[in-house]
Amino acid sequence: MCRWNAYVGQPLVIGELLYRTRHGLIDESLHSRMGAETTNGDGFGVGWYLERDRTLPARYRSVNPAWNDANLRELADHIESPLFMAHIRAAVGSPVQQTNCHPFRHGRWLFVHNGFLDGFQTLRRDLVLAVDPSLFDGIAGSTDSELLFHLALTFGLEDDPLGAMERAIGFVESKARERGVDNPVQGTVGISDGERLWAVRYSSQHESRTLFISEDVDALRRLHPDNERLQQLEEGDRVVVSEPLADLAGAWIEVPESTGLSLENGVLTQPPFQPR
Amino acid sequence: MCRWNAYVGQPLVIGELLYRTRHGLIDESLHSRMGAETTNGDGFGVGWYLERDRTLPARYRSVNPAWNDANLRELADHIESPLFMAHIRAAVGSPVQQTNCHPFRHGRWLFVHNGFLDGFQTLRRDLVLAVDPSLFDGIAGSTDSELLFHLALTFGLEDDPLGAMERAIGFVESKARERGVDNPVQGTVGISDGERLWAVRYSSQHESRTLFISEDVDALRRLHPDNERLQQLEEGDRVVVSEPLADLAGAWIEVPESTGLSLENGVLTQPPFQPR
Amino acid sequence: MCRWNAYVGQPLVIGELLYRTRHGLIDESLHSRMGAETTNGDGFGVGWYLERDRTLPARYRSVNPAWNDANLRELADHIESPLFMAHIRAAVGSPVQQTNCHPFRHGRWLFVHNGFLDGFQTLRRDLVLAVDPSLFDGIAGSTDSELLFHLALTFGLEDDPLGAMERAIGFVESKARERGVDNPVQGTVGISDGERLWAVRYSSQHESRTLFISEDVDALRRLHPDNERLQQLEEGDRVVVSEPLADLAGAWIEVPESTGLSLENGVLTQPPFQPR
Amino acid sequence: MCRWNAYVGQPLVIGELLYRTRHGLIDESLHSRMGAETTNGDGFGVGWYLERDRTLPARYRSVNPAWNDANLRELADHIESPLFMAHIRAAVGSPVQQTNCHPFRHGRWLFVHNGFLDGFQTLRRDLVLAVDPSLFDGIAGSTDSELLFHLALTFGLEDDPLGAMERAIGFVESKARERGVDNPVQGTVGISDGERLWAVRYSSQHESRTLFISEDVDALRRLHPDNERLQQLEEGDRVVVSEPLADLAGAWIEVPESTGLSLENGVLTQPPFQPR
């Protein structure tokens, strides 16, 4: 369940993307009330970096459905950021509470996840024990996603985000084999340190949730001719979204199955993603 | 836009109806996450009478979506009541706050509404002024529904619930004509004083939201052969629901357009509903 | 019963004042847990203007106690503003809900109030009727404070804030006389349009809650030698606080009883306040 | 911080104790707004057993301050129970979220704690690892109190509550010695299985928070001559409270330092409490 998106580029008022694009994240959540496939009404979160200091991301997280949160609407109109991530949650088991809302944070790092660890009740204790003791107390909530993030931190996320994700997911899959859990990992992941953006599309059974990246800003500009801010987007401004935005064909590149994504200084690479 | 149901009969653990029937109210809200037509995630409320004292209804109301409210699940399993009403809300304009959650209450009276007053922003001040000054301070929230309830109280709801609803809605329609608002009233209404239950299905354009009443308890028993509590229902135990429960055909009688409903001492009557 | 403060000057990270000054607003609320006179735990709000656009104030309001709101802590560290107001609430009668949290807003105007209208239940309907019909629908909550703001708007707040407050309070006092309510008005008020700041200290019985303004920034700098940001405050940067900060003697000027305050282009005036 | 109380006896409407006794739990919280020593405004919880089934305790927990929670007031007036526990929280570190509100529950068991584990960040991982794997997934929140409960369950609470508490606290103290944490345990604990009530007053440094038990119902009756329900209390009805109710001298017996308490079939015993 869940959906997320991320933006990196010149400073943008975050509401431009969350509310004022067709099929923006909140629009999706509004839209789903009108007949879309799922409701993501179990809380949400936004994390953003400031232009003046990219080492201290801020978060606004809430257990309200995103569509009816009055504060989110206010903040979205007033916060300008060169890099932000937003996440809407559909809980699958763990409680609806602020500490279970994405993005999760460690120092300058933000992390979002659309998906789940299957057999989490069976695996949870093993995974908790594998988290580095120095990171243990950073686990504030009770989700599989936050635990996956702390495993990735344990396996070196701050030095090599995609490699650490490969090792963390590989570890989950090995523990799952020991415990007789099939296909434990599902989802897409977004990671940032305030300068760069990484993403992963992977599932143990290789039928992963979708992940898209904007092809170029020209397409976005053409789609929203009346949106002044979007008209001012420049080459290198990029949007990553976890779920397909159907009628924006041409504007989006689908990230292939079992693939990572890295956006660094405007350079996009998409290495294969191979848990080990 | 909202759904409600009501039960009157022998004392029943309210969770039997809210959670453990097919297409119960919370099931509907859960179901809507899986693809149903609408989401009713903007708060909810339950009002119930105690067997030992039917003059002091209790309420539990919350701004959480009903499907993820942990307290509702607890209470539903432990509260037993001979008459209760539940409501899930999809807000159309007014804020998501507890004072806007149904049921509304005045003394021993409870009131739920599935629908809206069209042109409410235009009409609101006129309607507020028409509320009896002695009732004015009882308006705690900002919904059209609560205001309609206080108009009905002003027009004699405590003596003649269906007649007062006719006068209140007639008044709204006359004010709407003055202000150039077409078809101002839409919806179904449920009313109780702890002993009796009334309902209304009406809209100014005579295309009202649906309203159903259980035909007889035999049908409910047959549909849930494994539910011990429902097996113990007796003749005279009745359920009123605002929205059609599709696959329970045979178990439900649709209340006709522009019709009232009265359940008093086990006697069901369905007079025409004619605002004046 | 509530406290508030306001800042106008060069852009300041709002947390500097809310959290990192001695006896800042949140500190007060934390402090009150340790033995202070009152608890202001019934919600709070912050309203701020952006340097780049002073016509669209943002608000973050919540029903949580300010001291335990995780989002406030986040926002306070990341929002920079040349003019902001913060308010912590101790409810006296009206529900704890977001629409009852200060600051209230109308267009570019923000409004906070520390105090109450005595006999509000008796007076409420008269006051609601006196609000200009075009402003009627802007009343989102149920507090005396928001209603007082809308009366002041009705009496011309946007053209003459202090004069409109005199007329609004004069009106409340005249209605109170009609209804036999003694001493209906109590409190201090803060008002801004994003450029200028006004305040009022007044009560019908002339025993008003306190109101203070920072004498000069030198004093603040001397009191917090280790706070880099405060060291950078310039002449003309001013703080207005509703409650006395005892050990900052010398740094604060008490606003006299029945007095208004106006801060415009760095010029402070304190005219007498005479309801009429 | 925190406070709690518990009642066992003939079925009582829980509001009689929570709201309508002098210095009842909510009154304390209200009172603390007027000048008492501390504020317990970081959430609360009530757990109660039904007369008809004492194996399935219900809980109502909320992150609101108890004093302003409208639902608690409703429920307190309508829920009747022969055994209930209520807890108001002052958070010391862990987040204000429903899963951190007492009472904690395991099957038919309820648990409340007024106090803390000092050095919890240092000890947490060791303690988590010591919880029986079959109980691990029952830890829903992040408090020291819930973890202490699960340690006690691991050490046999369901067979021997006071002995298990001695072993659990002994274990915490031994881990604390290993990690160089002095005096790790502080507080009072309440435990019930729906039939019986246990309590502990203990701290590692033998300066524990207070704990009191009602001497006899005569005293309570004399103190509230106008409260009809309390007049009907019978011998054997007992109240346990964590904090001294000053002006009820004569009505309360202080539980001595380092002492357990057991109420079983009306028989009160107070064995020494010796962690091992």
Image (cartoon, coloured by chain):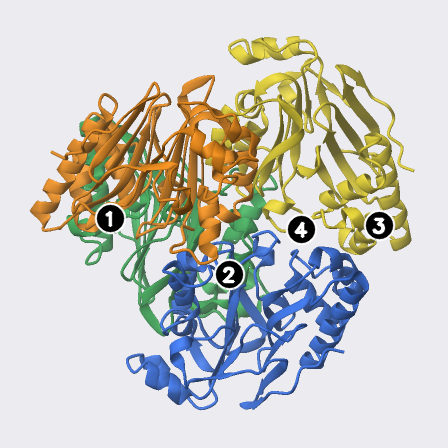
Chain colours: A blue, B orange, C green, D yellow
Q: Which mark is residue C150?
A: 1
Chain bearing tag 1 is C
Q: Compare residues A251 and D16 and report the one nearer the observer.
A: A251
Disc 1, SS: helix
Classify mark 2: residues with Cα within 10 Å, few (<14), some (14-19) or many (20+).
many
Image quadrant in which you'd find residue C263: bottom left
Query: Do discs 1 and 2 share a chain?
Result: no
Q: Is residue D234 above or below residue D25?
A: above
- The label shown at residue D130 is 3
* Residue indicated by mark 2: A44
Percent of width and height locating residue C106: 27, 57
The percent coordinates of residue C142 (x first, y second) are 32, 41
Residue most toward the left?
Answer: B178
Q: Is residue D244 above or below residue B28?
A: above
For disc 2, the chain is A
- Seen from the viewer's position, the closer of residues D103 and A71 is D103
Which residue lies under the disc numbered 4? Answer: D93
Work out how far the residue at label 3 is from the one at label 1, CA to CA, in angstroms: 60 Å
Q: Earlier in the sequence, mark 4 or mark 3?
A: 4
Q: Do discs 1 and 4 share a chain?
A: no
Q: Amino acid at mark 2?
A: Phe
Label 4: how many Cα within 10 Å (few below 14, some 14–19, many 20+): few
The nearer-to-camera label among 4 and 3 is 3
